[in-house]
Every structure is written in C-alpha cells, then in structure tokens.
Image (cartoon, coloured by chain):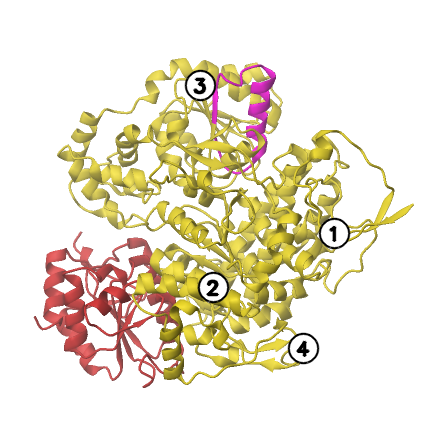
Chain colours: A yellow, B red
Amino acid sequence: MVIYVAPKPKEMKDDFWKSKDIKISIGEIEENEGAKSVEEIPSGPTPKPSITDLRSWDMKLLDRYEPFYAPFCDMCCLCTFGKCDLNGKKGACGIDAAAQQARTVLLASCIGSACHSGHSRHLVDHLIHEFGADHPIDMGMNIDIEAPIMMTVLGKTPKNLGDLKEALDYLEEQMIHLLSACHTGQEGKSIDFESKALHAGLMDNLGMEIGDIAQIAALNLPKGDEDAPLVELGVGTIQTEKPVILCIGHNVLPGAGIMDYMDETGQEEDLEVCGICCAAIDISRYNNRAKVVGPMSKQLKFVRSGVADVIVVDEQCVRTDVLEEAQAKNTAVLATTDKICLGLPDLTDEDADKVVSKLVNKEIEGALILDPEKLGEIAVKTANILSPERANMKMLPDLDEIQKLAAECTECGWCQRVCPNSQPMMEAVTGAATGDFTGFENLYLTDVCYTCGRCEQECERELPLMSMLAKVGERLSKEEKFTIRAGRGPAQDVEIRKVGAPLVLGDIPGVIAFVGCSNYPEGGKEVAEMAKEFLERNYIVLTTGCGAMSIGEYKDEEGKTLYEQYSGDFDARGLVNMGSCVSNSHVVGATIKVANIFAKKPLEGNFEEIADYILNRVGACGVAWGAYSQKAAAIATGVNRWGIPVVLGPHGSKYRRLYLGRADKKESWKIKDLRTGEVLEGEPAPEHLLYAAETREEALPMIAKLCIRPTDTAKGRQIKLNNYLDLYKRYFGRLAPDVHLFIRNEKDIPITYKKDVQKVLEEVGWEPRKIAQEPSLMGMDGD
Amino acid sequence: MSNDRVIPWQPTVIAGPKQALMVTPETAELMIRKSKRPLFVLGPLVKEEPLLSLAVGIAEKWDLPVVTTGNAYKAFNEKGLDSTAYGAVEIVNLLKDPEWKGVNGEGQHDLVIFLGCIYYLASQGLSSLKHFAPHLKTLTICKFFHSNADASFPNMKDEEWLKYLAKMAGQ
C-alpha cells in the first residue's frame, strides 16, 4: 500500500509516540514533506563533488570577497630548497607570498578537517562495532532531515550507521587529494589554493555532521531537544573531596565508558567526572551528572590545582605536556585514542586490575587504553585508590609562599612580552610581592590569561607563574558555579518551519552563532555580553563548544546565567547550545533546512543552489571571537563556502587570510534576479565573508550589519538596519556612514532614524533602486 | 639585553630577514615631511588621556588625515578630531590597493603612520602592507618595536614614549 502524506506541518514536539512504544505500520511512504523519502530522489548537478566541481562557485565568492593576506612569516620552510624569503620575491619552487599564504590556509584547513573527520571515523567504526551497521539514524519525531549537509553534498540520506561509512570514504578520498596539493610544486595560484581550502572546509563540515549524528543516534544524546537539561558548569561545582576524573579533549567515548562503569557498579554518586573543552560538553550530553569545568583556557591552571586524581585525554586541544604536568601532581594519566599516545605503553589488552596496580604503584607513567569500556573501569578504580593518598596534592602552596616567590621577580618584563594576549603578568607578580593579589585575581577571573604558560617558560627566575595563578584563584574558584544547557543537537524541522519565513524576510533579524575557542582578547565575558545583546534584540542565538561554556560563565544581577534566562528554542530570543565542536555542523544544517523546508529547494547534490540561497537570503552570521585552532579555521572556511559570513576576534588575523568585500566597488555587488533575468545594482550584503574585528565594540555593529540580506522585506530591512544603526551609534557616537548603501527605497528607512538617514541620502545623491525578488550570483558573466 | 629596544615587543612576530628601521621622533618627522599623502591610523589603545591629546596634537600639527580603527572613532570625535572609521583590516585592505583614492579621494597614500592598534593585529596588518603594498611606507609610533613596519619607534617605557609623542606633537 502506498500512502501519500499531505504536506502539513507536524505539531508533535516530543517523542510521545516513542515513549509509549506505539508502533504504526503504514507501509512504504512514497513522498513526505521536506526531503525524506524512501524513493530515490533525482540528484542535482554535483553529488559527491570532486575538488574542481564547485570551483566555479568558489570563484564567484572569491571575486566578490577577495582574499586578504597577512603573512605570519615571510618565509617558506617546507622543503630543502629553503628557507625561501617570499617578501617581494618568489621562492625556489616559484611560489609567491600570496600563494604561500593560501597554501598554508589549505594546510590548516586540511588539519582541522582531518581532526573532525578522524574523530568521526573513530566514532562511526566504534559505534558500528557496538550497535551494528544497521543501527538506524533516527533523530527523533521532529527531525526528518537528519543530515542536511550529507544530503546536499553526497546526494543521499543516511539511514543507518553503515551508511555513514560511505560518506567517510568519499570525504577521506577528497582529503588525500587536497593534502597532496600542498606539496611543493603542485598548485601555483593563490585563488586555486583558496578553492581547495574551501573544499577542505566543506569536508570539515561534512565530517562534523557525520560524527555528531552518529553519536546522537547511537548514544541517544539529546535530539534537538529545546528543553535539554541544565548541567553544572565551573570549577566551584566540583566536589574535591570525592575522587575526581578529568576528561580533556573532544571524544565522548572514554567519558561515556567512565559514566557507564560508575552506573553499572553503583558508584554514580561516589566520584566526580568533569571535563574541559568539548569532551565536557559531549559527556554531559550523554549523562548530565558529568560536570563541565570550562573552556580550554582552564586547562593548565586546573591541572596544576591538583584536583584531578585521574586525567583522561582523548583528542584535540589537549596540552601536549599534560603527562609531565600531571606527574608533578601525582595524577594518573590515561590516553585513549590513537591521536594522542604520549609515549605510554598500550595496555588495552591487559587485565584492568593489573593496569590499575601498575598505575597506583608508579610502575608506569600512565597507560594507553583504546577500549572505552575497559578505560572506564581502570579510570574509576585508579581514582578511588589515588584520591585518599593524594589529598595533600590538592593543596597548592599557601599565599605566604606565593608572596615569597613573587619577591624574587627581577621585573625584566619578558613575561608580558611573550604573553600572546599581552597581559600584565609582571604587575601581578610585583603586586603579589607586596601582598596585593588583585593582579593575579584579575588574570584568573576574566580568562584573559589563557594559561598557556609561555610566561613561565620565559621567566629568568623560573617562577611557577601558572601555579601561583592557580593558588590565588583557588579561593575565587569556589564561587565559580554556573550552568550550561546540555548540547541539544540540531534544530528541529518544525522549528525551521516556524522561523523560515520571518528569517528570510527579515522579521527575525538574524541567526548568530557564537562558536569556537577561548582566545578572547578581553576574556569570555565579552562573548556572554554579545550573546545577550543579540538575544535582547530578538535574534536567534546559537552556540557550541568553548563559546557555549563562556556564555554560561556569567550571571546577571539576580545570579542567573543566560541559559537560565532564555529558552533553548530555535526561535527569536532563543539561546541554543547545539553541543560540541562537531555540532557546528548543525549551524550550517539549520540554514540548509531553511532553503529546503521554507523555500522547497531540493538538497540532493545541489550545493551551489543551496549556498547561493543561503548567501543571498538567510541572515546568518558566525562569531568565533576566540578562534585559535586549525579546526576553527576549517569550520569557518567551510561555513564561508555555504555563504555564511564569520566575524573573528583580533587573534583571527593570525590565520593569515580573511575574505573581505569592498563596499566602495559597486560592480562587486551586482546581482541577478532569477525571477526576471535582470542583472541589478546590488548592495554589500553581506559585506565581508571572513572578518577580524579589533574590539567587541567594533564587532557588534559589524555582526548586525552582516545579517542584512538582499531579500529582506521593507519591514525586515528596517528591523535589521535599526539594530545596526543602534549599535553603531552606541559605540561610534554617530549614524553609520554607510547606511545609504542598504536603503533600496524609502520604505527601508527605520522610523527612529528617518530624519538622519534622509539627510545622508540627500548628501550622497542617493536614488532608489530595484529589489531583486530572487537574488543570485548564478547566471552572471556568461554562466 | 643590549638590543632589547629593537627586538619586536612580542619577539615571535619576527617574520624574516627584513626588519624595521628604528627611528627617533626626528626621523619620523622627516618621513612625514617627505611624504606627499600621509595617513594617520589611530587605534583603540590611545583613546584615553594623555595619549588621546597627544595623538590629536600630532594629527593637527602635521595636518594629517586620520583613520580610526576598532572603536576609537567616538573618543577622537568627542575630542574634536575629524576621522574616518574603518576596521583595522578594512583600512589595510584599502591601503594595499594601488588604485584606491585614499580617505580624501586625492590618491593612494604614500606613508601610513600607525599608533594605538592592538600589537599583534597591527603586526599582521603591517605584514600585509610589507608584502603587498610596495607603493607605500609604514611607520609605527607605538611604544613597541614593530619589525614588520618600514620604520618604528623602539620598545620604550611610558615616560620616554610620552616624551617622543609630545615632541612629534610640538608640545
């Protein structure tokens, strides 16, 4: 029997049917709204695109948003011809400075993409081993489009874990070709290195989606649940009198193994399991008793605090000297993936109790345990034994000792010069020498110190500056008790259906995603402040990873975190923690779903049309205020290829390449109206694709501006401009001087700024222009 | 360290063999005098006194067109200094285009003087201009040595730096 399902919105917002174990058999469904279908859907033009298949789209983007290069290094040091100085010269292989920068960005994007994809490959293989290849990819009743990136890029919807292997096979093939292009004597033009970097970014986005839907489906993480539980966040939430296991990294499996072992042995209340970086987020998605210490900026000071009895490292963003640091505190270290082995013996196949015995008797420095289940047992047993005997290791030198150490400072100032964030460490030390610890307190509390430890490496008196910081912060850390909403995973289709029209028309002024790492210029509080600003202005605010933690670390006057003040709905004024790094795929996924669910654009193998739609119609903007990693570079580059602009903090300039538009070049902004076929004068919307702002005050109006899109209705444009002009006026004290560029006709002028704007329009000789009904970069210049 | 004044303030920004020339206020003034179309770029680190007044003094003494970066515009505007606001990366992007007509529409600038941008961001911008803007020279008058500039003040303590700036402002 074939039933045709009428395309009406689903009302079901929970898993009621599943919870009642009600099964309805209606035979094979031939057609459904949205994109899910058992029937083979005709594929678009670029299923499984090769490196060159999307090159024409890349050239359109790069023509409008030209790469801006800021070399970190004048030289190339990759082959034995070198070093070659590329400052005004070509290298021995013929490469110039622009191509070398683009090549470095491609390399960084490949590294970042490989991290996510290697992580995903590990997850998929393990989960297939545990649950079987036919374990269904079921994202719950409210999500039909389970894998929007995969559908668009591969042209297929994965039905089960086994299907994800095909996606990984494709991705890995692409990555080999991309990485090979970095070799000396391969690609020669910066613009083609860029196209390849964009492809590497797309592979990164695909890899992230594979990983997250695999773990959501198999480990039953929240499936787009807007009411995902609040989880404890902050150093102060950890009960240090219990045995403490700290997980650092990104892979959920070791942490899940620990939680499972504790549950199975009835020890769920007996130990504390906490995490730093995305492992913390994903373990708390798996089991909300796990606690989140915070972003990676906490890493060294927390390890130095000695609170952890066992440190479990998995992959990505783990300090490479973690073993040395842990040994100084008699903390046991367990490595758990092939990415980080730390020189430790592989004892995966050894009896768990024997491994525990070797660890607690210091026969081994640590162990590599590649089986998450066994790891859980070893970690718990080791922590139970070590905890009582380590009680004195959880104490840092007292403040008198800190004062004595500080008195040894020679005031050479090099601690500040090598600080990546130019923080006043020397002042903190000289203050401490007199018994004034406020300098250290400021560095501790605001996270302007990344605890990288470069200051300590440079100190001519070898002062243990990070330990001193940890000690001064010890008292303050007890107050660090916050909440974070557990990562909910993707937006539900039903939510997209609700916000699709207001988002594309501009009534909801935009979707802003605060993502990335914690290399903040002025501390994490800025991220929370920016998020609050846009929540109050009715934007949909998404977040992931360290950004999500930073948002949770600040409370209002009533002592509430933003997660307690705003709902987790994917809607205006919703604060949506999507999850970890790999959950960034759902930020892109949500914009793809808008194109599919609201605009009925087919996804399968249809990348260019979807990206063109997102660029011109979906007012989304990413903000990676503290981005530091190659992964963040890959994510942003992939997101850019989908047509989503990204604003970085000032450290982002060190990525060497941005994509900047030129508002002063009118011809850059011409646009085709697909409805009429006319090529029209356009507007710089969005003006830049990858931008680095110097200050929060500069970033805020820029973010609002980057949400403007050519399809805004007059009402939507007024709302967006009102936000842009408000923020610009607040921080610059005047009307934004480029406002005339975004006024298509007088209906676009925000009422509150009408007189001021009209005056500007007169001054610049403004004239109204046609509005493209279906703006597109396609079909121009002989396409 | 004997050459401490000309090791980049953040020592790891050393990019290659080409290093900036260390200059005094006198040499900096000579560069401005020789320039036909100079530009003064002021960042958010000098938007408070006494640096604000010194920066305004320099702009006025040498009649320099001014670009403000980050959120520096408001403070300088309130101080009565007319400037054009750009993001630091935006102005560098414009400066590297030989066809750009400059902030006053009179042609691309031939000398850019930087003061008060975040060190590492300025270093990246200066690197961009070093590589891709052979048509102009860069001068930094921050209290930090910038090896990616063509010419830079040395690393200094505040007291010496304020004297340098006061000298350039004719105070």
Task: Say what amino acid the circle numbered 4 marks.
Answer: Asp
For disc 4, the marked residue is: A783
Numbered tag placed on residue A8 in the rendering: 1
Q: Nearer the viewer, residue A310 or A43?
A: A43
Residue at 58% over, 17% down: A352
Residue at 64% over, 73% down: A778
Mark 4 is surrounded, within 10 Å at the Cα level, by few (under 14), some (14 to 19) or many (20 or more) other residues, namely few
How far apart marks 2 and 3 lie (CA) works out to 51 Å
Q: Nearer the viewer, residue A773 or A306?
A: A773
Disc 1: host chain: A
Q: Is residue A778 visible?
A: yes
Residue at 38% over, 17% down: A390
How far apart marks 4 and 2 lie (CA) works out to 32 Å
Instruction: State which mark lies toward you, 2 or 3.
Output: 2
Mark 2 is surrounded, within 10 Å at the Cα level, by few (under 14), some (14 to 19) or many (20 or more) other residues, namely many
Residue A401 vs A624, above or below: the answer is above
- Nearest to N terminus: mark 2 or mark 3: 3
Q: Are marks 4 and 2 on the same chain?
A: yes
Q: Residue A187 in the image: x percent, y percent?
A: 57, 66
Q: Residue B69 in the image: x percent, y percent?
A: 31, 66
Q: Are marks 3 and 4 on the same chain?
A: yes
Task: Say what amino acid the circle numbered 3 marks.
Answer: Pro
Left or right for A328, reference A782: left
Disc 3: host chain: A
Numbered tag placed on residue A720 in the rendering: 2
How far apart marks 1 and 4 lie (CA) works out to 37 Å
Residue A193 in which image quadrant: bottom right
Q: SS of the residue at dot 1?
A: loop
**Range drawn in magenta:** A247-273
- Nearest to N terminus: mark 1 or mark 4: 1
Disc 4: host chain: A
For disc 3, the marked residue is: A243
